[in-house]
């Protein structure tokens, strides 16, 4: 498929002429997943190109963008309530431009709702047409025009948008957009469109430039990275990136069990140290009948065979998953199937969600007789069990020395920092020096189900700490 590498920009210069010398500011609020975080970096990039600078609070901004999520009802309600709060800003300063981007802006009924009931919202913009942002801001400023961009996705990719990254040492690199899987509960294929992959050369070049600029961790992003299809497979792409010069780690999100290849597992083994020993492998449900109704197209046996191969190739791999509780028709027996797999796999962490019917999806029309009490009860049992497993998984880290990428200062005060191990576990630790963005060694002293605690060792990661490291 043809991918466009440059879109005509019809607004940036026009807006820049209007913002020049006025100290105009922008505020971007991000909800949802990593795809949205990556998109928000582009929204900020475009805002800066239009002459806006970052505001600390929305009240200071003359351009406010809310990047929304539609994955569950709760996410939508949250977005609407946040947007509602901006009405007062518009009333106080009518020239403020308020835009809604993200997955909710691709749902026709939501756009209609916003158009009718949120008169203070200037525009909505579906995610695959993000590059039109400057044009919409220009239309608002020049003609006071409200715009609603919906249903325009032409299946192509806009390359080369300006990016304003949030971190100097961690970066997201989108390798593909959209999804073709149509899991029966999921809104993503409807709001993000069909799957499309970026050209490998563009991805590799972006990674090379990031590493050269000092980035230490790159997360390759896609709804289903294992079905990356360009001139090479995902396993080849990640291997090419792992072969780049430099001291860095690669992560990737998300993998669909049906597409995890032996080639990828081999690459993780071969490039250990460069490809992070962690894998997010959404199970969703531990009952083959429910998996079938979810249109997940794998069985629990196939799923477990992948886990086995991953553990054989990368023994200390950190495994995480997503679980949907109370999918329509889930019986107690089906739920116990999920519990059984959780017990068997012993995940380091689980993200669990109560099924939320999404308008337009198949599962929204399925009969659901599970009571609210049953839903909460299943969720509580799952969480209690996972807490025990997570502690069991974290305790062996005590007394080990872990290589940690330092993220930030912790809120607890001076000398306290947070970072992540290669496997992606959060570590809270003390350090005499401020070494944000560096790989350092931390001696783990305590473990809880969700965090590790420790003390930084002196010296940096370039000095070999013999016998203690387990990278
Ligand atoms: N592309 C990723 C998932 C994206 S959505 C993948 O295929 O794994 C993240 C998670 O949200 C999903 O894995 C699923 O567990 C959950 N989810 C998606 N739709 C949902 C719904 N309608 N109700 C509850 N949870 C949902
Ligand atoms: Fe949704 Fe399934 Fe696509 Fe993931 S693979 S985004 S759960 S449809
Ligand atoms: Fe939400 Fe869209 Fe991501 S629906 S989870 S922001 S792809």
Image (cartoon, rainbow, N blue to C red):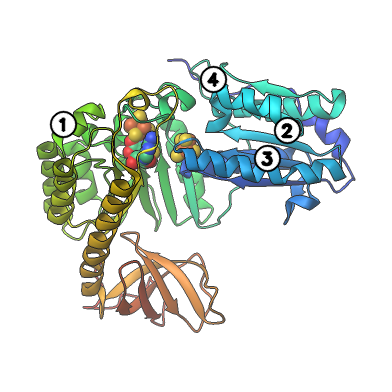
Question: What secondary structure is marked by label 2?
Answer: loop
Please state the horizontal and vertical placement of residue 174, each as a whole percent of the image: 46, 37
Question: What secondary structure is marked by label 4?
Answer: loop
Location of residue 65 (image quadrant): top right
**Viewer-side label of 2, 1:** 1
* Badge 2: residue crowd in 10 Å (few <14, some 14–19, many ≥20): many
**Viewer-side label of 1, 4:** 1
Mark 1–mark 4 contact, CB under 8 Å?
no
Question: What secondary structure is marked by label 1?
Answer: helix
| Camera-side residue of 153 and 346 | 346
Mark 2 → mark 1, Cα distance in angstroms: 44 Å
Image mark for residue 289: 1
Q: Is residue 39 above or below residue 228?
A: below
Q: Which residue is painted at 31% across and 79% down in the image? A: 446
**Viewer-side label of 2, 3:** 2
Image mark for residue 4: 4
**Viewer-side label of 1, 3:** 1
Image mark for residue 188: none
Mark 3 → mark 4, Cα distance in angstroms: 25 Å
Question: What secondary structure is marked by label 3?
Answer: strand
Mark 4 → mark 2, Cα distance in angstroms: 30 Å
* Any part of residue 206 in sight: no
| Quarter of the image where the N terminus is located | top left
Mark found first going from the N terminus, 2 or 3:
3
Query: Which residue corresponds to mark 2?
Result: 121
**Viewer-side label of 4, 2:** 2
Query: Which residue corresponds to mark 3?
Result: 65
Mark found first going from the N terminus, 3 or 4:
4
* Badge 4: residue crowd in 10 Å (few <14, some 14–19, many ≥20): few
Mark found first going from the N terminus, 1 or 3:
3
């Amino acid at each position: 498929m043809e991918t466009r590498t440059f879109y005509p920009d019809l607004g940036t210069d026009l807006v820049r002429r209007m913002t020049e010398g006025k100290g105009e500011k922008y505020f971007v609020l991000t909800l949802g997943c990593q795809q949205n975080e990556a998109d928000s970096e582009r929204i900020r990039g475009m805002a800066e190109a239009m002459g806006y600078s970052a505001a600390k609070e929305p009240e200071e901004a003359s351009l406010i963008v809310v990047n929304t999520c539609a994955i569950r009802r709760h996410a939508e309600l949250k977005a609407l309530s946040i947007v509602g709060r901006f009405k007062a800003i518009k009333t106080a300063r009518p020239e403020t431009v308020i835009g809604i981007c993200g997955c909710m802006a691709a749902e026709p009924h939501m756009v209609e709702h916003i158009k009718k009931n949120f008169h203070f919202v200037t525009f909505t913009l579906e995610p695959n047409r993000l590059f039109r942002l400057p044009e919409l801001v220009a239309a608002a400023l020049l003609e006071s025009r409200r715009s609603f961009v919906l249903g325009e996705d032409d299946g192509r990719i806009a390359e080369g948008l300006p990016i304003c990254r949030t971190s100097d040492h961690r970066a997201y690199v989108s390798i593909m957009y959209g999804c073709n899987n149509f899991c029966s509960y999921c809104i993503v294929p409807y709001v993000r469109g069909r799957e499309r992959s970026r050209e490998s050369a563009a991805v590799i070049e972006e990674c090379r430039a990031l590493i050269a600029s000092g980035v230490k961790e790159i997360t390759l992003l896609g709804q289903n990275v294992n079905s990356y299809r360009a001139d090479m497979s995902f396993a080849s792409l990640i291997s090419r990136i792992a072969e780049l010069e430099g001291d860095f780690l690669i992560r990737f999100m998300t993998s669909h069990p049906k597409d995890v290849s032996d080639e990828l597992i081999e690459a993780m083994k071969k490039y250990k140290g460069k490809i992070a020993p962690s894998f997010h492998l959404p199970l969703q449900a531990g009952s083959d009948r429910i998996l079938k109704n979810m249109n997940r197209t794998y069985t629990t046996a196939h799923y477990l065979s992948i886990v086995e191969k991953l553990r054989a190739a990368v023994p200390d791999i950190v495994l995480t998953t997503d679980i949907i509780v109370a999918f329509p028709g889930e019986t107690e027996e089906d739920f116990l199937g999920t519990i059984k797999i959780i017990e068997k796999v012993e995940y380091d962490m689980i993200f669990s969600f109560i099924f939320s019917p999404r308008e337009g999806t198949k599962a929204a029309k399925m009969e659901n007789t599970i009571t609210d009490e049953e839903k909460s009860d299943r969720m509580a049992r799952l969480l209690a069990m996972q807490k025990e497993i997570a502690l069991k998984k974290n305790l062996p880290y005590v007394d080990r020395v872990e290589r940690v990428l330092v993220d930030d200062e912790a809120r607890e005060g001076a000398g306290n920092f947070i970072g992540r191990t290669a496997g992606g576990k959060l570590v809270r630790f003390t350090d005499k020096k401020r070494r944000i963005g560096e790989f350092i060694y931390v001696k783990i002293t305590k473990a809880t189900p969700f965090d590790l605690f420790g003390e930084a060792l002196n010296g940096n990661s370039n000095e070999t700490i013999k016998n203690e490291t387990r990278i």
